[in-house]
Image: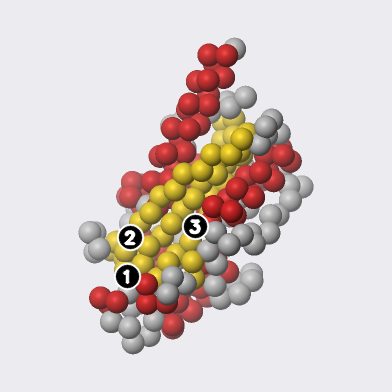
């Protein structure tokens, strides 16, 4: 039944952010910290959707709970869409957030601000373990890659991703501000609607 879900991520920063986005859902949100033997899923898909579905299916089958997974890509116009789905591993395996955005800034060195357009894409996959029913939704945030980092909040590429309407990087926003506009927030608004529908369908069928 969908009165509890498990977040299919080992990323602590992401787990905290997603838990906040789902806090008003009225169901128990569990994390992989409660399942220490859960497998680490190799994210080798060619798209964010493929990675999100793979993670959600693996964790749903392992835990027996409805699993929610997300994957995020960063597409930069001046780089032909790179790093794309490889954003988390752009500077290599087991690297820091800073390593990734420093590589990005290095590759954009000399590119004027008006040519530094970019967008975040988050895909959320929801998988029920009984029948591996899969539903996916997505959220997009358009912005510009800064010429230098700013802000101490957030994680990932947040210090170098400027939201033009606000004139700030995501790292300069408070968590509540970010959770109102971000790509992940947009995707999870849609995901919450699916989870609520699943919960209601179970209650009706009870």
Q: Are marks 1 and 2 in contact (CB under 8 Å)?
A: yes
Residue for badge 3? 72
Which residue is located at x 39 percent, y 81 percent? 108
Q: Which mark is residue 142?
A: 2
Question: In the figure, is residue 130 to the left or right of 28?
Answer: right
Regarding residue 59, the answer to whether it shows in the image is yes
Tag 3–tag 2 contact (CB < 8 Å):
no
Q: CA distance from mark 3 to mark 1?
A: 17 Å
Measured as percent of width and height from the top left, residue 130 is found at 69, 30
Q: Which tag, 1 or 2, sits closer to the chain's start?
A: 1
Vertical arrangement, residue 135 with respect to residue 14, above or below: above
Q: CA distance from mark 3 to mark 2?
A: 13 Å
In the rendered image, residue 159, in percent from the top left (x then y), is placed at: 39, 67
For disc 1, the marked residue is: 117
Q: Judge the density around disc 1: few (<14), some (14-19), many (≥20) Cα neighbours within 10 Å.
A: some
Q: Residue furthest right?
A: 37
């Amino acid at each position: 039944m969908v009165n509890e879900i498990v977040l299919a991520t080992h990323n602590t920063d992401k787990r905290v952010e997603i838990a906040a986005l789902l806090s008003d859902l009225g169901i128990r949100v569990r994390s992989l910290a409660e399942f220490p033997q859960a497998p680490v899923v190799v994210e080798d898909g060619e798209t964010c959707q493929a990675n999100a579905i793979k993670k959600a299916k693996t964790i749903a089958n392992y835990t027996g709970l409805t699993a929610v997974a997300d994957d995020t890509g960063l597409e930069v116009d001046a780089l032909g869409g790179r790093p794309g789905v490889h954003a988390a591993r752009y500077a290599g395996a087991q690297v820091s957030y800073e390593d990734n955005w420093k590589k990005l800034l290095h590759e954009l060195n000399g590119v004027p601000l008006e040519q530094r357009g970019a967008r975040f894409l988050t895909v959320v996959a929801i998988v029920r373990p009984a029948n591996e029913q899969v539903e996916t939704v997505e959220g997009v945030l358009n912005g510009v890659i800064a010429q230098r980092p700013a802000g101490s909040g957030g994680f990932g590429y947040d210090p170098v991703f400027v939201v033009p309407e606000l004139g700030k990087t995501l790292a300069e926003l408070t968590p509540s501000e970010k959770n109102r506009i971000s790509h992940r927030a947009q995707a999870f608004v849609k995901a919450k609607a699916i989870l609520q529908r699943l919960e209601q369908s179970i209650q009706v069928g009870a």
